[in-house]
């Protein structure tokens, strides 16, 4: 019998090579190439048998039902998916261990079971363990079927015979195809098992949810090509010390990316937070220096978040800088701009920034809010309880325009804020009713922004 030649595949990017390298030529990572066996003819035949379209078709002859989406019964989940589940789509849901991925999918199964036959495939838990979790969550449906199985061949045959409306695979790292000799969770197994489920979803028009683990860096475990195969990539995020969870869309072929859904983890499962802005700013201290409210855009949704700054005299030769929920390098840049362009000196001061609620502000529009919180703490003067600020700060100390200004100001007005500090170049585009109902202060520089709040 001829010897089967092995390949070396990168666990980070999926790069394949006939020989081993210490450093991956594809992504540059060290010691990530693992020996794998190549795809067998049997595996290729399985994929080809799942294809439903084997002929060339004219674009104008293809029929389309653009409104054919399946509602999950959870508004926040539908928002992130772009309005519901698209038939024949392959969705990857990832997150840290214990964050609530299986809990979320079990709750969605209860709603989907009212209109579709749901097959829940578990490679990590037994049927009795899933039943125990479902009883705790109050999940019960006659259309929800459990299959504790890790063999992809058996799962494919079961799907063909049962013809479910929705399939959930928990998790892809536990799935194994017998024609591949490598162990479960390896690069080849994860990639080829996902390929089989992709062909199954497209060939039979069955939406399939795939749960994926994450590595220590927070990225999805397995080859990077895994994210390219699926139609939608969802990240379930949250801090262990907070009860709130954020479902974020990183890729979506059928909707907007960077949409988020907010949930609260309770003893009875995950509950929707329909007004995350109110949740993020609840419990704010009144008339306290070093705090300011920002408005950032998460997809098409404006969200308000409280930014706290603390500046105090340092006890060391080098002042300490710490940032939670905001980029550390950008914070250092803002401190340099405040010293050079505005005359607020932090040379002998420790500076700390914290975004309340576990939210992370990656948008440049939060620059002005962070700067005001730092200056407010330095001067020990309150910004104001009913004041909101947003804008990008440049290296010259100027306040630059941001997008979606009208949506941000409207959200502030809806939640009872009375004053908004915004970039000067955004002021002209605002409608008259907002200018009448709110005290809007357009500013050009960072010093002008703080002078508009307090007398120095």
Image (tube, helix red, strand yellow):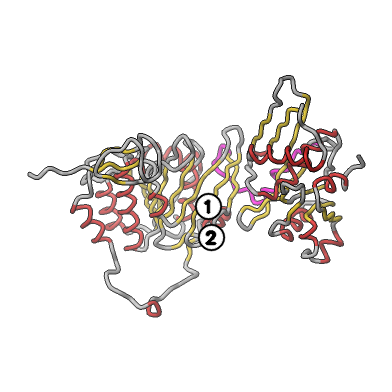
Q: Nearer the viewer, residue 328 or 170?
A: 328
Residue 63 against residue 240 in the figure, above or below:
below
Rendering coords of residue 240 (x, y %): 57, 33
State the mark number for residue 249. Answer: 1
Q: Nearer the viewer, residue 378 or 240?
A: 378
Mark nearer the N terminus (1 vs 2): 2
What residue is shown at x 22% (from left), y 41% (from top)? 181
Q: Is residue 41 magenta?
A: no
Q: Is residue 267 magenta?
A: yes
Rendering coords of residue 289 (x, y %): 82, 35
Q: Quadrant of residue 54?
A: bottom left
- Of helix, strand and loop, which one carries label 1? strand
- Of helix, strand and loop, which one carries label 2? loop
Rendering coords of residue 276 (x, y %): 66, 48
Which quadrant would the C terminus be assigned to in this image? top right
Outermost residue toward the bottom?
60
Q: Quadrant of residue 323?
A: top right
Q: Nearer the viewer, residue 443 or 297?
A: 443
Q: Is residue 251 visible?
A: yes
Q: Is residue 360 left or right of residue 452?
A: left
Q: Is residue 448 left or right of residue 139?
A: right
What residue is shown at x 57% (from left), y 54% (from top)? 259
State the mark number for residue 82. Answer: 2
Q: Which residues are magenta?
A: 266-285
Crowd rating for badge 2 (residues with CA inside 10 Å; few <14, some 14–19, many 20+): some
Label 1 close to label 2 by CB (< 8 Å): yes
Which quadrant would the N terminus be assigned to in this image? top left
């Amino acid at each position: 019998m001829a010897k089967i030649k092995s390949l070396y595949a990168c666990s980070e990017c999926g790069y394949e090579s006939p020989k081993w390298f210490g450093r991956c030529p594809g992504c540059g990572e060290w010691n990530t190439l693992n020996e794998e066996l190549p795809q067998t003819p049997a595996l290729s035949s399985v994929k080809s048998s799942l294809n439903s379209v084997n002929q060339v078709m004219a674009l104008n002859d293809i029929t389309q039902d653009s409104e054919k989406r399946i509602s999950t019964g959870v508004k926040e989940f539908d928002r992130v998916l772009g309005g519901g589940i698209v038939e024949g789509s392959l969705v990857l849901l990832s997150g840290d261990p214990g964050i609530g991925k299986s809990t979320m999918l079990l709750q969605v199964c209860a709603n989907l079971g009212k209109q579709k036959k749901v097959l829940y495939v578990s490679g990590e838990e037994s049927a009795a363990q899933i039943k125990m979790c479902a009883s705790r969550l109050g999940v019960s449906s006659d259309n929800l079927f459990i299959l504790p199985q890790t063999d992809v061949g058996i799962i494919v045959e079961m799907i063909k015979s049962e013809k479910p409306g929705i399939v959930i695979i928990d998790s892809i790292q536990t799935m194994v195809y017998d024609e591949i000799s490598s162990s479960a969770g390896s690069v080849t197994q994860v990639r080829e098992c996902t390929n089989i489920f992709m062909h199954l979803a497209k060939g039979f028009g069955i939406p399939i949810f795939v749960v994926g683990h994450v590595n220590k860096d927070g990225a999805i475990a397995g080859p990077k090509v895994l994210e390219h195969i699926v139609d939608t990539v969802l990240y379930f995020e949250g801090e262990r010390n907070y009860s709130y969870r954020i479902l974020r869309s990183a890729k979506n072929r059928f909707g907007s990316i960077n949409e988020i859904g907010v949930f609260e983890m309770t003893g009875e499962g995950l509950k929707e937070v329909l007004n995350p802005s109110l949740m993020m700013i609840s419990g704010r201290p009144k008339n306290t220096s070093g705090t300011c409210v920002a408005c950032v855009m998460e997809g098409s949704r404006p969200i308000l978040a409280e930014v706290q700054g603390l500046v105090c005299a340092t006890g060391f030769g080098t002042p300490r800088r710490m940032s939670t929920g905001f980029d550390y390098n950008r914070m250092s840049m803002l401190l340099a701009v405040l010293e050079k362009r505005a005359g607020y000196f932090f040379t002998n001061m420790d500076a700390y920034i914290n975004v309340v609620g576990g939210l992370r502000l990656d948008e440049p529009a939060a620059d002005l809010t962070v700067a005001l919180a730092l200056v407010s703490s330095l001067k020990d003067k309150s910004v104001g309880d009913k004041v909101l600020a947003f804008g990008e700060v440049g290296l010259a100390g100027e306040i630059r325009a941001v997008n979606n200004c009208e949506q941000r100001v409207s959200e502030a007005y809806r939640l009872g804020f009375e004053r908004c500090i915004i970039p000067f170049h955004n002021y002209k585009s605002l409608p008259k009713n907002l200018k009448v109902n709110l005290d809007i202060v357009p500013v050009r520089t960072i010093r002008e922004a703080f002078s508009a709040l307090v007398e120095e």
